[in-house]
Amino acid sequence: MTLVAQTNIEDHLRPILDKVSDPEIPVLTVLDLGVIREAIEKKGTVYIKLTPTYSGCPAMDVIGDDLKAAFAEAGMNAKVELVLAPAWTTDWISEQGKRKMEAYGIAAPLEETADKEALLGDAKVVKCTNCGSTNTHLVSQFGSTACKALFKCDECLEPFDYFKCLK
């Protein structure tokens, strides 16, 4: 069973949040990535709860600063709090976010069982973001960042990152 954490985001804050991108995957907004757990305005200050994609992710500091800057540009003060529980999961990436990721050249995370089979080399299930073939193989458990693995397509011969499933 997949546990999906509830979010509490006031509608009037969504357009501003949607302008803040992940510095590691700039086509994804913080809303696409599902890292915003709460964004509420009280007495002119926006309080944001941000969940890291994984413990120690270096992008979180940048995202926090970018959130504050985006709200300052809109004439609002923002306070960002890191929230570790419940832990972020790749299930929180929006369907739109997964499509954007694939168009950018990063294979979206598979479900947990398929992910393990792909990363152990037991199954050819990771789809090439260039040609769409599943005739791909794992090159390295780690790609451009720790949350990605490096794959190569055996059809078009292009390397590409795969965003690992995290539960």
Image (spheres, helix red, strand yellow):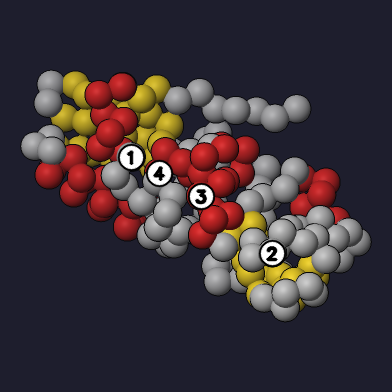
- Element at label 3: helix
| Residue pointed to by mark 1 | 18
Measured along the vertical axis of the image, is residue 143 above or below residue 49?
below
**Residue position marked by numbered label 2 in the rendering:** 131
Label 3, label 4: how far apart the Cα atoms are: 13 Å
Q: Secondary structure at mark 1?
A: loop
Choose the circle earlier in sequence order: 1 or 2: 1
Residue ID for mark 4: 30
**Amino acid carrying mark 1 in the image:** Asp
Numbered badge on residue 120: none
Mark 2 or 4, nearer chain start: 4
- Give SS at disc 2: loop
| Label 2 neighbour load within 10 Å: few <14, some 14-19, many 20+ | few
Residue name at image x 40 percent, y 22 percent: 8
Q: Horizontal placement of 13 versus 137: left or right?
A: left
Task: Please give left or right for residue 43 compared with residue 27 in the image.
Answer: left
Q: As rendered, which of 130 and 87 lies closer to the eye?
A: 130
Q: Position of residue 3 (x, y in %)?
A: 65, 28
Label 4: which secondary element: helix
C-alpha separation, residue under disc 1 versus residue under disc 2:
30 Å
Image quadrant in which the C terminus is located: top right
Q: What kind of residue is marked 2?
A: Cys
Query: Which circle, 2 or 4, is nearer the viewer?
Result: 2
Between 61 and 95, the one lying in front of the other is 95
Q: Tell me which amino acid carries mark 3.
A: Lys
Please give the residue where the numbered disc 3 appears in the rendered image.
100
Q: Is residue 87 visible?
A: no
Residue 27: image location, x then y, percent: 42, 54
